[in-house]
Amino acid sequence: MRLCTFLLAVPLAAATHSVVAETYHHTFSASHPVLLRVRPGDTIVTKTVDSAGFDWQKIRRTKTHGNPLTGPFFVEGAEPGDAIAVRIVSLQTNRLHGYTGRAVGVRELPPALEAPMPDPDAVIRGYNYLVPWVIDPGSRTAYPKNNPAGLRFALSPMLGCIGVAPKGDYSPRSGPAGYWGGNLDYNRVRPGATVLLPVHHPGGLLFFGDGHALQGDGEAIGSGVETSLDVTVSVSLVKRAGLTAPRMETAAEIIAIGAKPDGNLNETLSLALTDMLAWLTTAHGLAPADAHLLIGAAAQLDILTLGGSTAVRIPRAALPKTPRRGPAD
């Protein structure tokens, strides 16, 4: 997909790199050794482990839970002030099982609406609040292993975590989200989407992980269907993008993301709306007053997680037909 907002720096001869990590990380940090160096335009083919560190062979690659990350990937030529554009080419489940949390994150439910605890150690020893799921690649569906209601849902793989090393030596864990990306748990980070991430260190230092076979809006039960994934992404470079937060583009929409560690929904929605206003005025030629009216008439607002991240989506069909050229032009 061509990103119409920015001019992408893409070399003439792109390469495809296949790599499987031996070490996975629990922090978005510039201190981790580089897994792979790539050039703008290159494609990365790799794998992720699940949120507990189990891989496609049921081997645990980490000692603890916490969304282990694949990376970092160093993008040649990326400098602070630029942005990395990560196009999600393909996400494929690569095993027959996953798991979820058991209950929505609503406090003080009436007793009749509370979810019972599943069998102790049904999924991972010591985590008796997890529910086992079956992933059926033949029918492209997934369902709870103990399933008296006959629930079954179409697979829609996504990446829960995607981001870059933040400013300085700040090294947030892979649980929160913020201006660097992080644990966004946005179910639109899926094939066909391009995620734009601001660069704070040479090479950008891209990480991703926390694969889900599927997930509803908001990650209401504290997880998607957690599993390992085969991942293919292509990486481009947007020079002098000047981003202050993650953005996304699809063929149909532009998307501003609001995320802040320990932020509430009001705070992060303010971040997303402010960034969308900036995007519409700087890249699409709208006066501030018109940008406000466009958001009021056409925006769709998403709750990414009950933990506080949000997004604002604008249909491309609602944008001016001749946008002003972006900051990289």
Image (spheres, grey):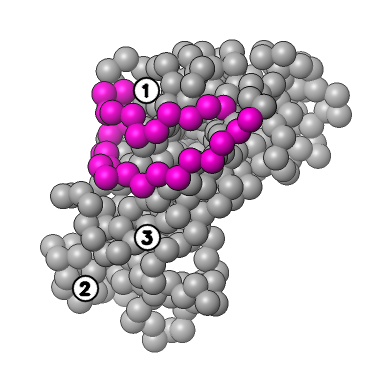
Mark 3–mark 2 CB contact (< 8 Å): no
- Distance Cα–Cα, label 3 vs label 1: 26 Å
Kindly report the secondary structure that dominates the magenta region of the rendered protein.
loop
Q: Can the viewer see residue 285?
A: no
Nearer to us of marks 3 and 2 is 3
Residue 275 located left or right of residue 18: right
Q: In the rendered structure, which amino acid carries the disc numbered 3?
A: Thr
Where is mark 3, residue-wise?
A: 227
In the figure, 279 relative to 207: above or below? Answer: above
Residue designated by label 2: 122
Of the 4 image quadrants, the one containing the C terminus is top right
325 displayed left or right of 305: right
* Cβ atoms under marks 1 and 2 closer than 8 Å: no
Give the amino acid at mark 2: Ala
Q: Residues within 10 Å of mark 2 (few under 14, many from 20)?
A: some
Q: Would residue 191 be seen by someone viewing this image from the given angle?
A: yes
Estimate how packed mark 3 is, as few (under 14), some (14 to 19) or many (20 or more) residues with alpha carbons within 10 Å: many
Residue lying at the far right in this picture: please name it: 321
Q: Please identify the quadrant where the N terminus is shown.
A: top right
Residue bearing the label numbered 1: 166
Asked if the stretch drawn in magenta spans residue 30, the answer is yes
Query: For this view, does 68 lie left or right of residue 79?
Result: left
Residue 25 magenta: yes
Q: Relative to 274, is 105 above or below?
A: below
Seen from the viewer's position, the closer of residues 215 and 48 is: 48
Alpha carbon of mark 1 to alpha carbon of mark 2: how far? 37 Å
Per the rendering, the mark at residue 279 is none
Residue 265: x and y, percent?
45, 38
Q: Which residues are magenta?
A: 13-40
Q: How far apart in space, not on screen, are marks 3 and 2 (Cα)?
A: 16 Å
Q: Is residue 12 left or right of residue 221?
A: right
